[in-house]
Amino acid sequence: MKRYNNFQMLNSCRAKVPEMYINIKDYKISIMRVVLSLLATFLQIYSQAFAAPISAQVTDEDGNPLEFAVITLVGENPTLETKNAVMPPPIMTQQNIQFSPFVLPVAVGTTVSFPNKDNIRHHVYSFSKVKRFELELYGEDEEKSVVFDKEGVVALGCNIHDNMLAYIYVARSHQFGTTNDLGSIEIANVNPGVYFVYVWHPRMSGDEEEYKRQITVTDQGLDQIQFRIPLKRERNRSRSKY
Ligand SMILES: [Cu+2]
């Protein structure tokens, strides 16, 4: 009598009932799919239910609070990221011969409008690698817009008024914000998980990669993250680097 080992037995059974085997296999796969999708939905609901705010404070090396620092959260796993509950409006106004805000963080692909609220004309431009553009002379209550499609820092100037300077920070993720005059920021609705936190400031000395920090957010949120960043020596505001 021919002897079969288990593997041969299995194969011979498969050969005899191929359709049944395939049906069972399909059935198993569809059950797995249902289980996995239920699990994914559960995890999503679970993590959203526990999304918490996190806060950060940025100072210079002497402990002085730094306003206009941009904090960006990048999830180790991209599905962790949620969009900012409140995004700063993507508007860079010219008023009183100044840009406002001084630093505007936006997500990649954002269209920023540049309304002129002065009764004189401005000529906004950037020579930055990230986005080179020029909005030729335009007057009061005229508005032009630019799409920022690449991450990085875009320094803005005005051809007519040398003192006008501002930055558009095109962020790596959808969770970011700028510090207030106390150097503080709170980012709401952060899912529990592992993140890299980036800090950037117009006067920061060195590269963002040097100061990035890994954090783990629990469902309780996180204690305040402290950043102490050295500043470039020169006090005059410079757009040369960007
Ligand atoms: Cu101007």
Image: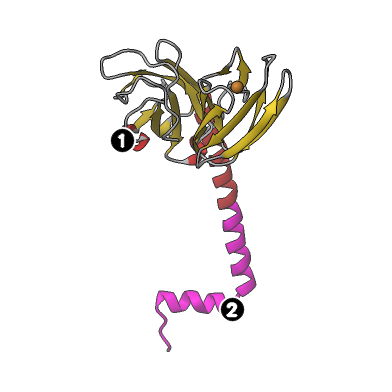
How packed mark 2 is, by other alpha carbons closer than 10 Å (few <14, some 14-19, many 20 or more), is: few
Question: Circle 2 is placed at which residue position?
Answer: 16
Q: Quadrant of the C terminus?
A: top left
Query: Where does the image place residue 212, in percent across and percent down from the top left?
Result: 34, 33
Identify the amino acid type marked 1.
Glu
Q: Secondary structure at mark 2?
A: helix
**Relative to residue 222, is residue 9 drawn left or right?**
right
Mark 2 vs mark 1, CA separation in Å? 64 Å
Q: Quadrant of residue 196?
A: top left
Q: Is residue 93 magenta?
A: no
Q: Magenta segment range?
A: 2-31
Query: Where does the image place residue 46, in percent across and percent down from the top left?
Result: 51, 30
Toward the front, the furthest residue is 160
Tell me the quadrant of ligand 1: top right
Against 63, residue 154 (above or below) is below
Q: Quadrant of residue 63?
A: top left
Query: Where does the image place residue 125, in percent across and percent down from the top left?
Result: 58, 32
Most frequent secondary structure within the magenta stretch: helix
